[in-house]
Image (cartoon, helix red, strand yellow):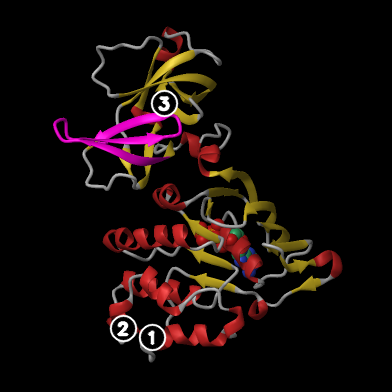
Amino acid sequence: MVVRGQFHLQQGHFILDVSFHLPGQGITAVFGPSGSGKTTLIRCVAGLERATPGFLEINGHCWQDESRHFFLPTYQRALGYVFQEASLFPHLSVVKNLQYGFHRTPPQQRQVLFEEVITLLGITTLLQRKPEHLSGGERQRVAIARALLTSPKLLLMDEPLAALDANSKAEILPYLERLHEQLSIPVLYITHAMWEVMHLADTLLVFEQGKIIGSGALTEVLTRLDLPLAHAYDAGVVIEAEVVEHDEYFHLTYLKYSGGQLSLRRENLPLGQKVRVVVNAKDVSLAVENEVSSSILNIFPATILEIVEDSPGQMMIKLDASGTRLLARITKKSSVLLKLQVGMLVYARVKSVALL
Ligand SMILES: Nc1ncnc2c1ncn2[C@@H]1O[C@H](COP(=O)(O)OP(=O)(O)OP(=O)(O)O)[C@@H](O)[C@H]1O
């Protein structure tokens, strides 16, 4: 199951020139500076622009193939589109807004149940309200539900949280996470916020000046030292882990991940719960010996994969800690004093692990 495409489109001075091959499920975050072409890509995928050459196939369904002059118009593409501002019909109640899309999909093509989507987005108690009586976060949850109820083969989300305040963003994220766990629809998710990428993305597409400069699994792309992301202030990695133990005496929670165990401040989470944690490059220091006298709890043996100058006087080090990628930002002076080299075994000391 894959989503693959290729578009070439000129608009004024701007040229979109991309080709991509993405997993057929999960969330692909589309990330890049303003004006780099993210919305243009989504418009091509939706059939709102006709790129030539152009090709698009969604899990075996061809929507465009210019080599045989084939272009499926937007209204025939089974896609859901969620924008920054939820565009609900103001005169209809929430339930009528939802039924509108649901009933337009022939019963034999429906892939989701009405009740299932309402429960998933937590909107059961909002059904009789008019959109004007909903908060921004609630409106956006209804907009997502409405898009899902059309049984799309692809969900396009163009900065769906950008217009919300911090509280509404935090309120809606768990619903997006659930959507991601429980539905197998591929999602293209445009955002400017690294925080959202780290929370939600499985795959990352990085845009610059109309081109895709990086694409692949989230951490693989986040740790590519030739891309700007690994040199941003908040550069870091995401680790998928599971809660395995709580230590009441020391007020710690232990997480298991593919490379071993991590501890963090006691969190009220059930055992077995899957979580994501972020380890920022600025919170990782390196030692050439394992100092047992250190106050740091999370220390991992790791091999240096790459070393590059990050900014004047600062180095970015890419590490492999038993199969898990880490980034460490250290001073150039420390790098010279420790005689760091590619292939060397070091100890990565992680000062802080943040639960997402
Ligand atoms: N109809 C058009 N005619 C000419 N240029 C256009 C047209 N539509 C978009 N552009 C230009 O194409 C470029 C890419 O725009 P696009 O909206 O895809 O960027 P973006 O990455 O989504 O930006 P943002 O993050 O600010 O939404 C911009 O330079 C924009 O000015």
Query: What count of labels does the image hold?
Result: 3
Q: Secondary structure at mark 1?
A: helix
Separation of disc 2 and disc 3 at Cα?
A: 48 Å
Determine which residue is flagged by label 3: 329
- Percent across and percent down for residue 351 are 30, 27
Q: Is residue 99 left or right of residue 243?
A: right
Question: Do the CB atoms of the residues marked 1 and 2 lie less than 8 Å apart?
Answer: no
Quick check: is 54 in the magenta stretch? no
Q: Is residue 20 visible?
A: yes
Q: Tell me the chief SS of the magenta region.
A: strand
Q: Is residue 89 visible?
A: no
Give the label, 1 or 3, closer to the camera: 1
The part of the chain drawn in magenta is 240-264
- Percent across and percent down for residue 241 are 39, 40
Query: Mark 2 Cα within 10 Å, few/some/many (few <14, many 20+)?
Result: few
What is the three-letter code of the residue carrying label 2? Glu
Separation of disc 1 and disc 3 at Cα?
A: 51 Å
Determine which residue is flagged by label 2: 132
Residue that sits furthest to the left in the current view:
249
What is the three-letter code of the residue carrying label 1? Val
Quarter of the image with the N terminus is bottom right
Determine which residue is flagged by label 1: 95
Label 3 within 8 A of ligand 1 by Cβ: no
Query: Mark 1 Cα within 10 Å, few/some/many (few <14, many 20+)?
Result: some
